[in-house]
């Protein structure tokens, strides 16, 4: 079974629209961390956020916000007022205590922001 | 602070040839990873080092892939002989702390990747 599922393979929006990326995870650990990374066309994975399993507070950073809900095992990511520079592939990832400090990635969601 | 450095950035080889990728992690980072990312998929862990020891190589195809991290700093990933299905981006990454009793879910920082095409 997939540990991290990103059901949306591609989302296309027009600039200034909001876009929400879904991430559902599966783990039996009570201690785990969730991450979001951005992968622009250059290929480098850029770290966006890290959240531990004991902190369910939502977080906002500029135009980015994250909604963590343990009850539904989801860690969704919203880009508000999207810009062309937001075009990239976004990955959700899970790090579990029993698996050590390594990441299990979802399949990614490609976001295309059109001017 | 310099990021994770990788080379070469791009490589095209014929099947059955060999190739080697080099990685220099962020200074002071104890843990180093190699991930394989096939086009359209998420990265998959190949091998994890802590200092110069292997922590996890369960997903490394050992009949053709090998990796080493001499002196606990730089690392090399080798493929020999390459197959068509090895065409992928090979991402090196590092994180600050090693494995310990305390799991910290440390942030893992990635390089730009080495793009391999096997023809």
Image (cartoon, coloured by chain):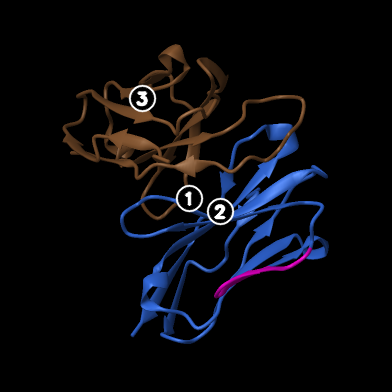
Chain colours: A blue, B brown
Magenta region, residue range: A57-66
Q: Chain of mark 1?
A: B
Q: Is residue A69 left or right of residue A82?
A: right
Total numbered badges shown on the rendered structure: 3
> Residue B42, which numbered label?
1
Distance from disc 1 to disc 3, alpha carbons, whole Å, reads 19 Å
Residue in the image at 43% along x and 21% along y: B73
User: Label 1 neighbourhood size at 10 Å, few (<14), some (14-19), many (20+)?
Assistant: many
> Marks 2/3: CA distance?
24 Å
In the rendered view, tell whether residue A19 sits above or below residue B54.
below
Residue A57 coordinates in the image, percent (x, y): 78, 65
Estimate the x, y position of residue A61 in percent, counting from the top left: 60, 68
User: Are the residues tagged 2 and 1 within 8 Å (C-beta)?
Assistant: yes
> Helix, strand or loop at disc 3?
strand
Give the CA distance from mark 2 to mark 1.
Answer: 6 Å
Q: Secondary structure at mark 2?
A: loop
Percent x, y of residue A42: 31, 55
Residue at x 50% of width, y 83% of height: A81
Q: Which mark is residue B77?
A: 3
| Whether marks 1 and 3 lie on the same chain | yes
Residue under label 2, please give it.
A106
């Amino acid at each position: 079974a997939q540990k991290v599922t990103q059901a949306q393979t591609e989302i296309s929006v027009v600039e200034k629209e909001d876009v929400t990326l879904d991430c559902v995870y599966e783990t039996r650990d009570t201690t785990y961390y969730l991450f979001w990374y951005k992968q622009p066309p250059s290929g480098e994975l850029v770290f966006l956020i890290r959240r531990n399993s004991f902190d369910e507070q939502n977080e906002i950073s500029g135009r980015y916000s994250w909604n963590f809900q343990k009850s539904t095992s989801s860690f969704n990511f919203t880009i508000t007022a999207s810009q062309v520079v937001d075009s990239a592939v976004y990955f959700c990832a899970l790090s579990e205590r029993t698996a050590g400090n390594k990441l299990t990635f979802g399949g990614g969601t490609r976001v295309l922001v059109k001017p | 602070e310099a990021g994770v450095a990788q080379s070469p950035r791009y490589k095209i080889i014929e099947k059955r040839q060999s190739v080697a990728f080099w990685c220099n992690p962020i200074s002071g980072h104890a843990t180093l990873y190699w991930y394989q990312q096939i086009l359209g998929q998420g990265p998959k862990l190949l091998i994890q080092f802590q200092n110069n020891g292997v922590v996890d190589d369960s997903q490394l195809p050992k009949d053709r892939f090998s990796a080493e991290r001499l002196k606990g700093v730089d690392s090399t990933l080798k493929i020999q002989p390459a197959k068509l299905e090895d065409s992928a981006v090979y991402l090196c990454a590092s994180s600050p702390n090693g494995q310990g009793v305390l799991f910290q879910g440390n942030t893992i920082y990635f390089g730009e990747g080495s793009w391999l095409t096997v023809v």
